Image (cartoon, helix red, strand yellow):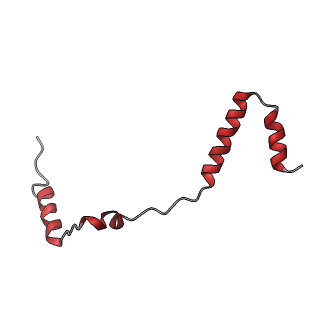
Amino acid sequence: MNIEQAVLEKLRHLPIDKQQELLNFAEFLYQKNIPKSPLRSVRGLCADLAVDITEEDITQARQEMWGNFPRDIV
């Protein structure tokens, strides 16, 4: 008797709710073994947006954010 036959034999003797639980567990194990596709980089996600941020844009944003820092907090 191989593993598949042994599992089926045990499955047949379980009540319906336990059979469903076993099926759910088998689906969980199956999903766990599916190889995940590699994540795309941020550059790849934004490549079609044609956004061009220059060093001057970054400098200006920093000045706007930190221009009056530190200030006296009352």
Residue 66, image x and y in percent?
Answer: 14, 57
Note whether 24 is above or below 61 in the view shown.
above
Residue at horizontal 84 percent and vertical 46 percent from the top: 5
Q: Quadrant of residue 73?
A: top left
Residue 70, image x and y in percent?
Answer: 14, 54
For this view, does 44 lie left or right of residue 25? left
Q: Quadrant of residue 51?
A: bottom left
Q: Quadrant of residue 35?
A: bottom right
Residue at the far right in the pictured view:
1
For this view, does 23 lie left or right of residue 6? left
Q: How many marks?
A: 0
Residue at horizontal 54 percent and vertical 59 percent from the top: 36
Note whether 61 is above or below 3 in the view shown.
below
> Which sits in the foreground, 13 or 71?
13
Note whether 59 is above or below 17 in the view shown.
below
> Which sits in the foreground, 66 or 40?
40
Residue 58, image x and y in percent?
Answer: 18, 66
Residue 16, image x and y in percent?
Answer: 72, 28
For this view, does 51 lie left or right of residue 2? left
Q: Quadrant of the C terminus?
A: top left
Residue at horizontal 30 percent and vertical 67 percent from the top: 47
Residue at horizontal 78 percent and vertical 31 percent from the top: 14
For this view, does 10 lie left or right of residue 68? right
